[in-house]
Amino acid sequence: MLSNPKTQVDTSVEPIESMGVDVVPPIPTPEYINTLVTRAKGAASRLATLSTTVKDRALLAMAEALEEQKDALLAANELDLEAFGTAPEKKAMADRLRLTDKRIAEMAAGLREVAALPDPLGDMPKMWTRPNGMQVGRVRVPIGVIGIVYESRPNVTADSAALCLKSGNVCVLRGGSEAIHSNIAIATVLSEAAEKAGVPAGAISFVARPDRDIVPLLLKQDRYIDLIIPRGGESLMRVVTEHATIPVLRHDAGVCHIYIDADADPAMAERICFNAKVQRPSTCNAVETLLVHQSIARHWLSPFIEKLVAAKVEVRGCQKTCQLSSSAKPASDDDFGKEFLDLTVAVKVVKHLDEAMEHIATYGSRHTEAIVTSDYPKAMRFLREVDAGAVLVNASTRLNDGYQFGLGAEIGISTSRIHARGPMGLEELTCFKFVVMGSGQIRE
């Protein structure tokens, strides 16, 4: 059974009644948050200097604990799923919320993958000597305390904890209220295993209150939290933008496009586009809009739409698309630039590469964009000119992922243009400080 989350996740957290724990009177929210972030800040200096051996041992113990506590995690997740409901419009979000044996195994595998990665801390890319003889270098160090505010997907709890731990950062995790039982259960397992392995208490901190007023308050803790990483929809991003007094790295909406060029291999295009939409449509790197060159659309598009429809995908097409396929429904203006997160895709027939790139520039979210083509100059131009965290040639947008890129579990896919962009692995959770080796130099 899970240990009491009150003592394992945070000393000031009141337990969740449905987990079978006695209810205690809650302390006021400002005091609760202050206790949480003060404790987290206190763990930062100790975690920053923890040896790689201890961190890796903790990560492996955390992975093993997730697997051992699988039944308890699934039971907690079932409480969230029951409360969330089964309304059709909630289908995509419910899929993101659901834990399965496979997803728990994937979380554990992600922890082990991070443990196997090189420790980024202490890396010094170069050192140079100045005319006065002093040596100057830059060494990689932790950011400090990172607040992660996210929705739905409980695996984010494990991924974030793993990457922050290995990179020497304390994490303050605030998941969505719809996954409160799942996240408390996961955070309890992880923090307990980590502390037993030698990680300081508070290094993995979880906000166990679902209150809406928590997030705005958390976003103003600039004395204790060094960076905020939000992962969620438009409403969450609006709250973060309005309230944060802390630097923010955004994991924004995934309005992803694939452009099928005139010179695309038809079979390759079909395989890539089908995977990008159908394999797991509720993720941010699933394709939402297909842009098809008019010459290939004449013979390729209609059969492919039939394949999508057979897979229960709703196709919303432009006027030319609807002329080519009676199975496509007319698209509205709002369908282009929309993150469906479901088995729905928008399709537009375009005249050339320039029109496709103009459409992406207008409607994309700078997350993931792809081209399918056998024309090398066009592929290179697409890579050079399209603005996104990841740009792919002849590959599914679903591959824009920290694990797929060899970074281990990711803490998010940054759509920001400062510090980190694309999948955020260990190196993206560090910064540099200058170090100087002198022999008595002074400034003249």
Image (spheres, helix red, strand yellow):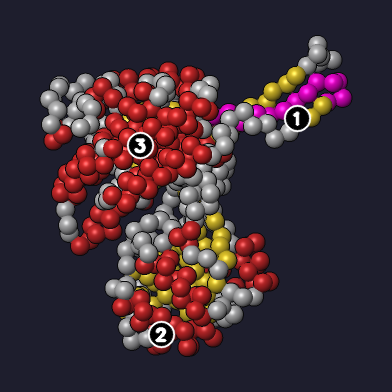
SS at circle 2: helix
Q: Position of residue 69 (x, y in %)?
A: 26, 37
- Name the N-terminal-most of marks 2 and 3: 3
* Quadrant assignment for the N terminus: top left
Instruction: Name the one closer to the observer, 327 or 76.
Output: 76
* Residue 127, numbered label: 1
Query: Farthest residue in the right direction?
Result: 131
In this rendering, the answer to whether 159 lies above or below 132 is below
Mark 1 vs mark 2, foreground winner is 1
* Quadrant assignment for the C terminus: top right
Magenta-tinted stretch? 130-144
In this rendering, the answer to whether 356 lies above or below 109 is below
Residue under pointer 2: 302
In this rendering, the answer to whether 101 lies above or below 41 is below
Q: Which residue type does callout 3 highlight?
A: Glu
Residue at horizontal 51%, vertical 27%?
53
Residue under pointer 3: 64
SS at circle 3: helix
Residue 163 falls within the magenta-colored stretch: no
Q: Position of residue 209 (x, y in %)?
A: 24, 32
Q: Is residue 298 visible?
A: yes
